[in-house]
Amino acid sequence: MTLRMTTTNVTFKRPFHLDGFSEAFPAGEYSIETNDEMLPDVSLSAYRRVATSIRRVTSASQPPVVSTTVSDPLDLAAALMSDRTAGPEIPANKAPKMVPYGCFPGTHNQP
């Protein structure tokens, strides 16, 4: 049996959830490791995913690295896609100010 291991580093901009885990994973950098095994008796090289794990990349000032096995790599891919398409996270002090409905800056109906 031939195994192939691939490691990819990704960054989540905001906390995310994965099926099977009650708590959210914090935003940050993660290392995703996938293990595939070569299918026997196939005329072309073909692989089947057998394991996916996610590991948080931390510095000395952060909590220790925790490795978690993810049962469904599609769930992890969906979480990453959701994070990518959500747009940039805006810090609270940089968020635009809310204007009351019907009031437009520079007009006579401004409160």
Image (spheres, helix red, strand yellow):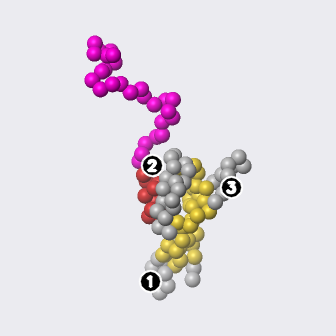
Q: Residue at x 45, y 31 (%)?
A: 95
The residue under the point 58% across, 55% down is 30
Element marked by disc 3? loop
Tag count: 3
What residue lies at 31% left-to-right and 20% top-to-bottom?
104
Reading the image, the residue beneath label 1 is: 43
Q: Earlier in the sequence, mark 2 or mark 1?
A: 1
Question: Residue 101 falls in which quadrant of the image?
Answer: top left
Residue receiving disc 3: 64
Magenta run includes residue 110: yes
Note whether 22 is above or below 83 in the view shown. Answer: below
State which mark lies toward you, 2 or 1: 2
- The three-letter code of the residue at mark 3 reads Pro
Marks 2/3 in contact by CB < 8 Å: the verdict is no
The reply to whether discs 2 and 1 touch (Cβ–Cβ < 8 Å) is no
Amino acid type of the residue tagged 1 in the rendering: Ser
Q: CA distance from mark 2 to mark 1?
A: 37 Å
User: For the magenta stretch, what is the residue range?
Assistant: 85-111
* For residue 107, side relative to residue 50 (left or right): left
**Numbered label attached to residue 83:** none
| Foreground: disc 2 or disc 3 | 3
Mark 1, Cα crowd under 10 Å, few <14 / some 14-19 / many 20+, is few
What secondary structure prevails in the magenta region?
Answer: loop
Query: Front-most of 101 and 11?
Result: 101
- Residue at label 2? 84
- What is the x, y in percent for residue 3? 57, 76
Q: Which image quadrant for residue 32?
A: bottom right
Judge whether 5 appears above or below 17 on screen: below
Is residue 35 located in the magenta-colored stretch of the structure? no
Residues under labels 3 and 1: Cα distance? Answer: 44 Å
* Residue 7 in sight: no
Secondary structure at numbered mark 2: helix
